[in-house]
Amino acid sequence: MSRFGRGKYSKTVRTDGYSIMFDISDKIRTLRTAKAQATVKISEESIQKILNREIQKGDVIEVAKASAISGAKKTSDLILFCHNIPIEWIGTDIRIDNRQIEIEVTVKTTSKTGCEMEALTGASCAALTVYDMLKPTDKNIEILSVKLLEKEGGKSNFREKIPEGFKIGVLVISDSVSAGKKRDTAGKSILKILQETGIKDVEYKIVPDEIERIREEVLGWCERGFNLILTTGGTGLSPRDTTPEAILPLIEKEIPGIMEAARSYGQEKTPYSMLSRGIAGLKGNTLIITLPGSSRGTKESMDALFPYVTHIFKMMRSGKHKT
């Protein structure tokens, strides 16, 4: 058994020839759609029989539509590595044009992964149904193509273009890390995710759990025009966890939904997520987000928020937004 890569898409390949599904547990649920098309070439005689409903096995168009729906819903049973996702809507459109039957299948889901395979499977099943129903009388029937027409949803649809000069400060708040008694893993995980997001101008500092030191560093970055400040640590319930108390007086416009989203996402992984006291908001044009101090909690919060949270800067530039 060997392992390739270190990211969320790393795969374990077994020497006996079997591999595994992609891990989508870190993804967020979004509305996703996909549309696929299958084209079947038939004879002019078959077209007339379909229109006159003279095919012995039944109404070709209606049966093909039903087959598309059934096939899309059973995709994970048919295709080995497809995830079993909730299908929330399937639309079928079947047209006869120039001795061809064109089948379009659209699938919608709110899931952690896309539904293009469901759309493709539905279109394929519809095309095979047409083939099966016409083959007794049409010896030249041919499935010409099955292809994906479009898909939407997922992280790529929410990725914002990072403007030139975008600056981020990452502040690790920890007595033990500051004293050199413990290695920083949470801050480094933030840096890694930011790099993957395409953000390069990042300043990284470590301070102890002291309110004045925290405020000093955060205010310094705000005064220097930093766009985003991410702190990690000090959001728990121990006597030294004072990050929210240090940051809250600095915030001019609180944005509760940011950390609500992070906690909601984390709650799917562990019930302890509800104990985080992280806050987020604006000081001037600087967005400040206080993340948990554990490497796991930090990574989960970053997975929940990025790249989606960067949309706030587009909102501030345009003065309008969609909700």
Image (cartoon, helix red, strand yellow):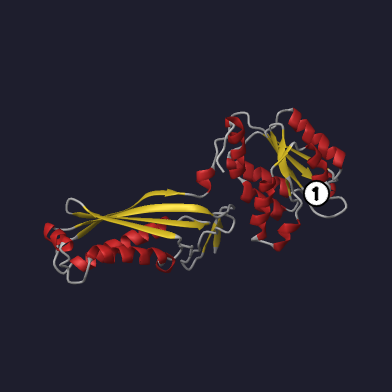
- Circle 1 residues within 10 Å: few <14, some 14–19, many ≥20: many
Left or right: where 86 falls relative to 284: left
Which residue shows up at 70% across the image and 51% down it? 298
In the rendered image, the residue lying farthest to the bottom is 57
Tell me how many marks there are.
1
Res 307 visible:
no
Please tell me whether residue 316 is drawn above or below residue 77 in the rendered image: above
Q: Amino acid at mark 1?
A: Gly
State the image coordinates of residue 233 (x, y, percent, origin top left): 78, 48
Q: Secondary structure at mark 1?
A: loop
Disc 1 target residue: 234
State the image coordinates of residue 255 (x, y, percent, origin top left): 69, 43
State the image coordinates of residue 89 (x, y, percent, origin top left): 42, 59
Quadrant position of residue 200: top right
Res 88 visible:
yes
Please tell me whether residue 233 is drawn above or below residue 55 in the rendered image: above
Which residue shows up at 46% across the image and 66% down it? 17
Left or right: where 9 falls relative to 73: right
Which residue shows up at 35% across the image and 61% down it? 122
